Image (cartoon, helix red, strand yellow):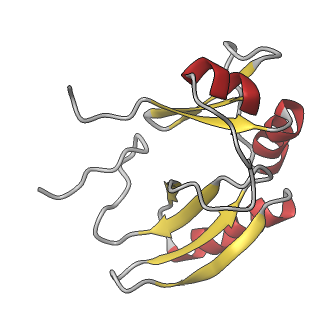
Amino acid sequence: MEPRISVVTFGVSDLGQARRFYEDGLDWKASALSNEEIVFFQAGSLVVGLFGWQALAQDANVATGAKSGYFRGITLAHNVRSQAEVDHVLKQAASAGARLLKPGMKAPWGGYSGYFADPDGHVWEVAWNPHSPIADDGSIRLPR
């Protein structure tokens, strides 16, 4: 198996609300492949999908439990090109309805980052990492 993540799909409680959060709040553009059951966004070299919580659980054949208010053991990172951009994105997300979990601050690894949770509790880190600059195409290449 090649080491690659192609799609991250969020199970959401209200697809319309989630779509509005990402489109109107964060200025993401939904793909033409999106429909009333699933929404796709191109996010650099990765695709982010939004799918109904119960439908995603059924598709994955997993039992459902509490869907918000607890840590799911996964975060997603949105890396930016400057420290100031971290604060801008965190403010943009909060204005769109996100819960600010941690404001932007200097990180022990030499960068700057903060966290927010979208309306369904998915945790996002917004980070500027001077050790992994973003390429023109939006990708990040880890040092060997």
Where is residue 85? Give x, y as percent. Answer: 59, 68
Residue drawn at 64 percent across, 28 percent down: 57
Residue 64 lies in what quarter of the image? top right
Where is residue 78? Give x, y as percent. Answer: 52, 55
Which of the two residues, 117 or 52, is positioned nearer the viewer here?
52
Residue drawn at 34 percent across, 82 percent down: 110
Q: Is residue 103 above or below residue 8?
A: below
Residue drawn at 31 percent across, 34 percent down: 4
Q: Is residue 52 above or below residue 21?
A: above
Quadrant, the C terminus:
bottom left
Where is residue 27? Give x, y as percent. Answer: 75, 44
Which of the two residues, 130 or 71, is positioned nearer the viewer here?
71
Quadrant, the N terminus:
top left
Residue 124 lies in what quarter of the image? bottom right
Q: Is residue 27 above or below residue 14?
A: below
The reply, left or right, for residue 138 in relation to residue 1 is right
Which of the two residues, 61 or 99, is positioned nearer the viewer here?
61
Residue drawn at 74 percent across, 28 percent down: 54
